[in-house]
Image (cartoon, rainbow, N blue to C red):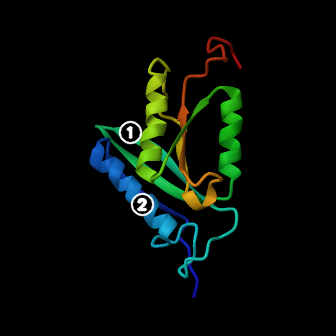
Amino acid sequence: MTYRLDEISIRVKDDKQGFETINEIYEDIFNGKIPLIKNNKRKSYNNLIPLGNYENYRDDEYTFTVFADDLDTLFQIHKWINYGDIMEFEGSGSTIDQARKDARHQLAIYWGIERTFTNDFETIVPKYDSKDGKVYCYLYVGIKNRYRDYDSDY
């Protein structure tokens, strides 16, 4: 019998332990322990990626949901980038932890952006899927649109 989860959600604190918990979830997804992009025989489904969604931030906690995306949501995210509603930050490293930290370091360079915490996403490209053998993290951060005139009626 083959099965696959559609998503996994957890409520985590915005601290080091919460960050490490998310790293573990990604590791379990890529190792096939959590059948999100692989079946219970650890065979990968074609064109599925794990895409994380940050939401419901309050009291220094947030809900993090990782879901199996067929690149449709990622396509929409790139449209939002073009519209100016999201910024993309890329990180890389030899581990998921290093790649995620590097992406957040790239975000920290833009400390002046007005974040909305709406439409914050993240995806990981594991070593075996990258061209250079590194792990990549793509962090997509919702921002106040710098192109749109918020006083207009559209």
Identify the amino acid type marked 2.
Ile
Q: Please identify the residue farthest to the front as the structure is shown.
A: 132
Horizontally, residue 81 falls left or right of residue 101, namely right
Q: Residues within 10 Å of mark 1 (few under 14, many from 20)?
A: some
- x, y (%) of residue 58? 34, 37
SS assignment at label 1: strand
Q: Residue at x 53, y 34 (%)?
A: 141
SS assignment at label 2: helix
- x, y (%) of residue 94? 47, 51
Q: Residue at x 70, y 52 (%)?
A: 72
- x, y (%) of residue 133? 58, 55
Is 104 placed above or below 33 here? above
Identify the amino acid type marked 1.
Tyr
Q: Residue at x 55, y 77 (%)?
A: 42
- x, y (%) of residue 29? 49, 65
> How far, Cα to Cα, is label 2 from label 1?
19 Å
Residue, disc 1: 57
- Residue situated in front as seen by the camera: 17 or 67: 17
Horizontally, residue 16 falls left or right of residue 51, namely left
Is 151 placed above or below 109 here? above
Residue, disc 2: 25
Nearer the observer, disc 2 or disc 1?
A: 2
- Residue situated in front as seen by the camera: 86 or 38: 38
**Which quadrant is home to the N terminus?**
bottom right
- Residue situated in front as seen by the camera: 10 or 104: 104
